[in-house]
């Protein structure tokens, strides 16, 4: 049997793309795995996870977002086309999940958890570090701007679907939703950083260094926290539904989003941001909200674990494919 060998340059090009993808993705999932190891060995516990998650969400990640946006020119990071595509793409996937899920899921609580798990990605904790690894600070700032629009949308859509399918939804109202959005530390960080970016205001070096020290702890703490929340026992619960939801979240959703984005004309870092946004695994917040609103928290937890495990391979494969095709 005759084996056709690829030319040396083509083989070298593919190997370079493989190494690029590996270097971008592997460190993130190694730290996540490290978090799982620490939890299993009892070095960290649930109290640590809760405290560190609060530190990341309320202090470190806002500091990172403020640092990145404030140091970048506003015209380079504010891309209305990218923002609109991200928002309407999320809405489209949400509506498709509602339509698809209602056809075969009869249990309303499971339907709500299924839909939320299929559209709500962990873009803040996992997506932004990945974008930084791939494209650098300017792209990460673009991603942070997108996040400031996507996170409120995630919350609003989640409350809508969980209210419609759960029994404990009366305590959620429009006023409460708006207040929570306005009080969100990540959105506050974006709003505070924009004047510095727009008017090219330079902070004193003392402030810059202090913010950088706090910002630098965001990624490792966030990733260790993600790993520590992974419980493989949850995979036994609602396995079939979680696999379907996970397939939509990390395979079919990103594939459709990337194809349409390519046809519209997105390329390079913007196309990469779209891929990371739609391929990020389901956020742990989906489990927390499902439990709080009387939805199917077991299914929600299972989707978080399944998407996180699957995304190790799907994100790597997606980045490798986009890089090989010369699109990013």
Image (spheres, rainbow, N blue to C red):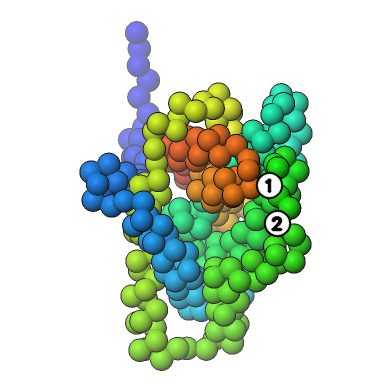
Residue 109 visible in rendering: yes
C-alpha span from label 1 to label 2: 8 Å
Quadrant of residue 316 within the rendered picture: top left
Q: How many marks?
A: 2
- Image coordinates of residue 80 in percent, x first then y, are 69, 65
Q: Which quadrant would the N terminus be assigned to in this image? A: top left
Residue 8 vs residue 56, the one in the foreground: 56
- Image coordinates of residue 315 in percent, x first then y, are 47, 42
- Residue sitting farthest toward the top: 1
Give residue 218's mark: none
Residue, x 65% and y 66% (percent of image)?
Answer: 181
Q: Secondary structure at mark 1?
A: loop
* Residue density around tag 1, few if under 14, some if 14–19, many if 20 or more, within 10 Å: some
Residue 73 vs residue 160, the one in the foreground: 160
Residue, x 69% and y 29% (percent of image)?
Answer: 107
Q: Secondary structure at mark 2?
A: loop
Residue, x 65% and y 60% (percent of image)?
Answer: 152
Q: Are marks 1 and 2 in contact (CB under 8 Å)?
A: yes
Quadrant of residue 99 within the rendered picture: top right
In this rendering, the answer to whether 305 lies above or below 177 is above
The residue carrying mark 2 is: 171
- Image coordinates of residue 216 in percent, x first then y, are 35, 68
Residue 224 vs residue 78, the one in the foreground: 224
The residue carrying mark 1 is: 168
In this rendering, the answer to whether 24 lies above or below 93 is below
Residue, x 55% and y 84% (percent of image)?
Answer: 196
């Amino acid at each position: 049997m005759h084996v056709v060998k690829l030319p040396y340059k083509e083989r070298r090009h593919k190997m370079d793309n493989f190494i690029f993808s590996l270097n971008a993705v592997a460190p993130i999932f190694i730290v996540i795995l490290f978090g799982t190891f620490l939890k299993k060995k009892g070095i960290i516990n649930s109290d640590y996870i809760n405290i560190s998650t609060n530190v990341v969400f309320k202090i470190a990640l806002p500091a990172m977002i403020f640092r990145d946006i404030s140091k970048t020119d506003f015209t380079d990071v504010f891309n209305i086309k990218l923002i609109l595509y991200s928002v309407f793409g999320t809405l489209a996937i949400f509506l498709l999940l509602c339509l698809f899920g209602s056809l075969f899921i009869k249990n309303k609580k499971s339907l709500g958890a299924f839909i939320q798990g299929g559209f709500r990605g962990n873009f803040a904790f996992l997506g932004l570090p990945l974008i930084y690894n791939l494209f650098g600070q300017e792209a990460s700032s673009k991603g942070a701007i997108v996040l400031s629009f996507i996170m409120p949308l995630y919350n609003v859509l989640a409350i809508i679907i969980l209210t419609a399918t759960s029994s404990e939804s009366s305590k959620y109202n429009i006023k409460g939703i708006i207040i929570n959005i306005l009080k969100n530390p990540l959105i506050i960080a974006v709003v505070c950083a924009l004047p510095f970016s727009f008017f090219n205001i330079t902070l004193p070096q003392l402030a810059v260094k202090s913010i950088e020290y706090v910002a630098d702890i965001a990624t490792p703490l966030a990733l260790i926290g993600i790993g520590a929340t992974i419980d493989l026992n949850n995979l036994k619960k609602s396995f079939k539904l979680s696999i379907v939801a996970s397939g939509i979240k990390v395979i079919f959703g990103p594939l459709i989003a990337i194809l349409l984005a390519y046809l519209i004309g997105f390329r390079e870092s913007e196309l990469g941001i779209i891929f990371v946004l739609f391929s990020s695994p389901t956020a742990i917040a989906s489990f927390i909200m499902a439990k709080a609103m009387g939805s199917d928290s077991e299914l929600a937890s299972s989707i978080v674990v399944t998407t996180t495990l699957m995304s190790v391979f799907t994100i790597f494969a997606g980045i490798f494919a986009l890089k090989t095709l010369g699109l990013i």
